[in-house]
Image (spheres, grey):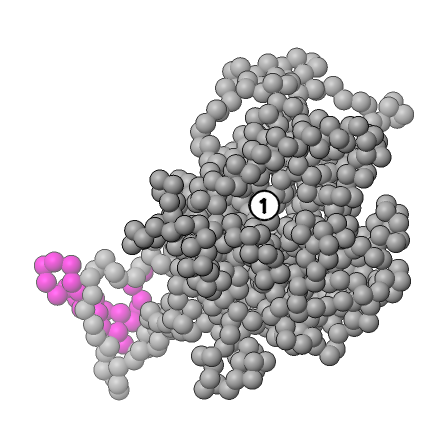
Amino acid sequence: MTRLPLIVGFGGIGPAGRSSFHHAYKRLVFESLPNNSYHETFLGLATMMNLVSYQNGHYRDDRGTTYQPSEVVSRFKERILEGTLVRKIEIDHFDCDQVDWHKKVSLQAPGSEALVFITDRKQLPQPIPTNWKIKPVDKAHLVRVSIQGKADFLVNSQREMAAQAAGQLPTGFTPETQYNARSHPRGLQMAIIAASDAIHSIGIPWKEIVDAVKPDEISVYAGSVMSQLDENGYGGLMTSRLKGQRVSAKHLALGLNTMPADFINAYVLGNVGVTGNSTGACASFLYNLRNGMQDIQSGRSRVVIVGNSEAPLTPEIFDGYNAMGALANNEKLAAIQGLDKADAHKIDHRLASQPFGNNCGFTLSESAQFVVLMDDKLAMDIGAQNHGAISDVFINADGTKKSISAPGPGNYITMAKAVASAVSLVGIDTVRNRSMVMAHGSSTPQNRVSESKLLDKVAAAFDIRQWPVSAVKSYLGHSLSPASADQLVSVLGTFKYGIIPGIKTVESFAEDLHANRLHLSNRDVQRSPGNIELAFLNSKGFGGNNASACILSPDLVNKMLSKRYGSDSLDRFLSRQRKTNFYANEYDQCAIKGDMQTIYRFGEDMIDEDQIEITAESLSLPTFKHSIKLGAENKYADMF
């Protein structure tokens, strides 16, 4: 019996705010929700952005003015809207109009004269160039330098960034203040906060979950694509020497792209189970999701935490992607917005990402998203929540390539397999009438043609008509490794509320699309809750990293559980969920008020290795209820 991986919790932080309890999703579709459905979402964003704080039962701003909850939303709604999603790069990251850099300058005195200047002896280069002559000026440390001929210098300068739009965490939210960050790179700070959010969202104390399984039956798959490239990670490692600074002992270790998983194991969960990270460029989350899904389906793990965290908003990464011609920079945005150079300051950076529209490149973003998977039997036994399930994830390469960044045939394979697997699971009628696609939708001209063509061809093969297609990069930008996690948490919101996010940054879709069988909308598409029972996530990555996943709705999962375990068992499961939902909602209310209860267990409950007990059959660890079984079935018995 193959175990079904249920999504029992999810959380994270990104440009739309906190993901748990569908808050980030509600920010995307708030116009289509009744006011009372997004009221708490905006209230949570107000505290997250430090527009107000919750003190002694009241919300107060920095001037001490007290507000009722409804007054917070009405007072700060516009600032919340302006300070979320894709927008011009904010000064907290860097000044995109005046980015520091070094200008190479060649100096030479006129004629045969020497170039002369005075400096401190400590600032002299080593070794002294052969055309430099050094003479002391005084008895202190000053020296006179005379240079014959030309000398090259690097001079501090500033320049305007070519690309100035990005999906950023809500304005005013500072991850390092959520726990004792100890000079952690931003991506790791976000991973700690996002994983904590996902764990709290489960509604069951983590210790109870640990006690319900063996210590080696919990897996964590998490990482980043670009590693940690800010000054506290590899950025500091690679530039310290050039800046005349020393490399920190933390730079090398904390820069590793596997570090999000390591941090979660060590400081959030205290986990001793399987850990790892699969890197597949922009499809990385689905690579990790496949690992977690297979662990549960095979019985190797009963609980899996899957996620990715990426903080790529540094000038160097912008320079790299812009040099590839991949980004929606100011020059391109001005052209598609009908502005000349004189009016470039009027660019609307909020419209930078336009999947399937007349676009010009993708928009970088930062995000950290995590989901908690649990096998169906354990979920039913402990009354876990049911947000949906993962039935399949397919990964295929492109074969021979001419360009490492160009799309290829691998994505045809992954999407066709995903749809075919869903047909075999739930039947063609459900796939044709109650499924949707969350497209990669990177907002590049090449993607809009290639992805629309492959989706249209797959739809034709299965005779799907008016297939709903959404692309949340229009709101969030492209967060690289967690991009498909951004897609997943939005799909979970669609399952609950029945609203498919429209591609609202697009005024009209491009004429070169292949969309005869696709339904693309620049408005939210209203469906009744439960109408969408299947969602296909599609993701592409540089190098031919293609992945597509099939996600099952909670209603469909309950039907499957009833079939497997019986209606009485399902009723008991739903009854147990009431307590779980109560405790989960208690956390949500605290987080809305600004207390995200970030877990950071630095040095807590460390395992005393002297207390580890080992026999030929098992290994026991202190603080863990169950022991680890060492004996295993001989998989190669037929060969001995």
State whether residue 12 is above or below residue 632. Answer: below
Tell me the quarter of the picture where residue 10 sits: top right
Counting from the top left corner in percent of width and height, residue 35 is at 55, 56
Secondary structure, mark 1, is helix
Instruction: Report whether 15 appears left or right of 371.
Output: left
Q: Is residue 404 left or right of residue 368?
A: right
Looking at the image, which residue is at 31% across and 59% down? 126
**In the image, is residue 527 above or below residue 163?**
above
Q: Left or right: 606 with respect to 575? A: left
Q: Is residue 132 magenta?
A: yes
The quadrant of the rendering that contains the C terminus is top right
The residue carrying mark 1 is 21
At label 1, counting other C-alpha atoms closer than 10 Å, the crowd grade (few under 14, some 14-19, many 20 or more) is: many
Q: Residue at x 48, y 45 (%)?
A: 592
For the record, the magenta segment spans 127-148
**Camera-nearest residue between 97 and 560:** 560
Counting from the top left corner in percent of width and height, residue 291 is at 71, 42
Q: Position of residue 417 (x, y in %)?
A: 83, 53
Magenta span contains residue 475: no
- For the point 24% across and 77% down, the residue is 115
